[in-house]
Image: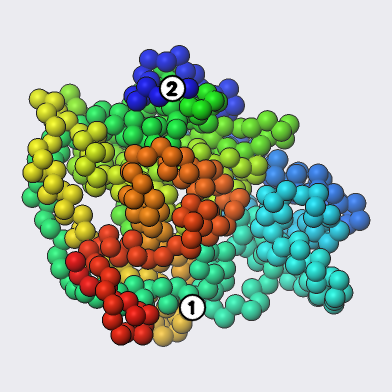
Amino acid sequence: MESTGEVDFNSPARACTEDYLHWDLSPEQIQLKSDEVIAKYKNVWDAVGSLDLDGVTFNNTVKALADMETECDSQVQILGFFKYVSPSKEVRTASTDAAYKIQEFIDVSMRKDVYQRILALAMKVDEDSLTAEDKRYVHMRLGVSIQDIQDKMKFSSKYINNLRSHITKTGTYKGSPGGLWIEAKGFKTYADFALRSNMVRSANKVSIFLDELTHKLKPLGDEESPKAKRTCQLKEYFPLEVVTQGLLDIFQDLLGLSFSLVHGAPVWHPDVTLYCVTDRSCGQTVGQFYLDLLTREGKYTERYVGGYYVAGYCVPLQPGCLLSDGSRQKAVAAIVTNFNKPTANTSLLTHQDVKTFFHEFGHVMHYLCAQVDYAVFSAFHVEKDFVEAPSQMLVNWVWEKEPLQRISKHYKTGAPIPDDLLDKLIKSHPAIARRELLANIELAKLDQRLHTHPESLGVLPSQGSTLDAQYYGYLWSEVLAMDMFYSRFKQEGIMNPKVGLDYRNCILKPGGSKNAKEMLRNFLGREPNQDAFLQSKGLKVSTCSDRRSRSRCWRKD
């Protein structure tokens, strides 16, 4: 399918037939559907948990659970989504209650009988009969790989007997996406337990990461970020409709996709629009996304989450994965922001608003482009310290001249941003948020201390808190995002469709079906490093004799 270079606003695109989301639910229907979802969970768990241990098969355990998750995931998402966006207070209240009730049921339903059946399967299944994603699913459910279980069985029946005995006596720990976990044995601190499935794996590695960043960023000092004296001037060049069309044009060209506005689509508010996404190479539908961008009464408000300012959300609504009959369900997501209502016939965005839009659209592309078998491996189910990397990377385009020119136009005259204003904006990038960066490192260290040595702070470990030892993850993800952008896009062309397709295939397409390190190696051709991140903050490398820097020092550029 040949590129037109523009978003198609006049195509006959329709809502995906696989889209089972409904936006006209009453409070009573939300209540009823939440009860149905809980009953579905319970029925499948009961069926799996009651199987004879000798009679477990892949189909009556793993496939049964995976099919249930695919069916229920969309319903759970939509029932909880109304509380953010519905114009009706009654619907928002019902949505809040339903989301709480479902989550509470899942949290208290950690079924050791289900765990035992998956373990029984892992002990006898022929690994060669399973796909890599099948094995990863079992690993996720058990907290240990099939290969490890079968290898240890060859040498020690005591290992399995102890494992079975522990499950029988104490149950399991929550924490994995499946809600099941073996005893938190061998973890020195709660932070180590909380980080076990992240890229870093341990609190000690987080500590090393933060200490190294602190040392390398010292040359920046406490320099203030430049004041946004040009904010009002810039705002005049970012009318919402121009930014939206420019953003969509950029990323459909870069990623080999086509976006088409779906006319007359059922939505939850008249301000909402729906776009259908197709693959340009074959015309196949990839998924759909909603844009709910303008503020209104009753809609969620911006807030701080885990110490970070959240001005928008990407909400996953329907995972792209295989259905029980082997057909593929299309992914559906939504961007929800609170941009100002139009004045003078248009809504004007600040540059910060534009950054938010690009960031959330990065999440949308991650969610829609993932091609996985299991719902639990849809895009956001990657390591927690990697999930922000794809969205953080797309923000780089709002600091580059060509993309800025494509997403801007004076709202009255249609004139482009003057070159001097554009150059000043781009040059300000390295200095933006330097002080905030150093402050966030200190807050990440405090979060780690809270979950490793809480007694030193005079508090109890905040297990299950908002931070949960994950604060460092935003910084970790940003390091990876900068490495991907500077090492491939900046060097080979920020609008290079070949690099864009590599990014889509290596980073977005696998979703959570592969380890992040493997995906990064495939895209970068090497192990990731911090060099691009440090350069983006205004530092340059030079030789020195400091052992901590391994004969490399970072100095202010």
Which label sits in the foreground, 1 or 2?
2
| Residue located beneath label 2 in the image | 2
**Residue sitting at 15 percent across and 68 percent down?**
223
- Marks 1/2: CA–CA distance: 50 Å
Question: Which quadrant does the C terminus fall into?
Answer: bottom left
In the depicted view, which residue is nearer to us: 528 or 125? 528
Residue 425 visible in the picture: yes
Q: Residue 186: image x %, image y %? A: 64, 79
In the depicted view, which residue is nearer to us: 88 or 402? 402
Q: Residue 108: image x %, image y %? A: 64, 58
**Residue sitting at 60 percent across and 35 percent down?**
33
Instruction: State which tag comes first along the sequence, 1 or 2.
Output: 2
Mark 1: which amino acid?
Asn
Mark 2: which amino acid?
Glu
**Residue sitting at 32 percent across and 76 percent down?**
552
Secondary structure beneath label 2: loop
Secondary structure beneath label 1: helix
Q: Residue 35: image x %, image y %? A: 63, 40
Q: Is residue 286 above or below residue 432?
A: above
Residue 335 visible in the picture: no
Labelled disc at residue 204: 1
Task: Judge from the rendering whether residue 273 lies leftward or rightward of residue 431; answer left or right.
Answer: right
Residue 339 figure quarter: top left
Q: How many marks?
A: 2
